[in-house]
Image (tube, grey):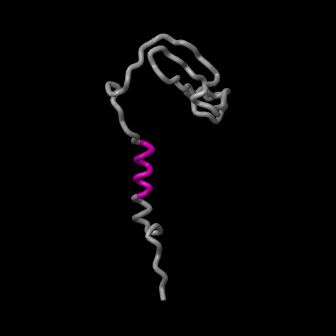
Amino acid sequence: MTERKKFYHNKYFQIIIFTIAIGYVFFPGSKNKSNLRRVNGKVVSLKISNKEYEGKDSFNYRFLEITNYEKPFEIFLGKESWDFKP
């Protein structure tokens, strides 16, 4: 008696999943710049840590606070050689 293969061992299924994964990585949701929210204001502070982002590495992140906006912006610095560059 032959044993049936599982559906996820089917090469066509694997090709479909691989194509979906590649599409998700290379074509993320495209937003037009006109659809993004514009923030105007003065810079209040640039801090190493922030209570809203607890647990972030203080060597790799800075937090920019701007008037007229409720949350600080998280800035990734990428200091190590293996980090992504900002």
Q: Is residue 79 magenta?
A: no
Question: What residue do we see at 40% from left, 40% from top?
Answer: 28
| Image side of residue 81 versus residue 68, left or right | right
Residue 33, image quadrant: top left
Q: State which quarter of the image contains the C terminus.
A: top right
| Image side of residue 81 versus residue 25, left or right | right
Question: What residue do we see at 66% from left, 32% from top?
Answer: 81
Question: What residue do we see at 41% from left, 64% from top?
Answer: 13
x and y percent of residue 71 in the render? 50, 24
Question: What residue do we see at 43% from left, 49% from top?
Answer: 22
x and y percent of residue 65 in the render? 53, 18
Give the answer, above or below, for where 79 lies relative to 12: above
| Residue that sits furthest to the bottom in the current view | 1
Q: Is residue 23 magenta?
A: yes
Give the answer, above or below, for where 18 lies relative to 79: below
x and y percent of residue 74 in the render? 54, 26
Range shown magenta = 17-26
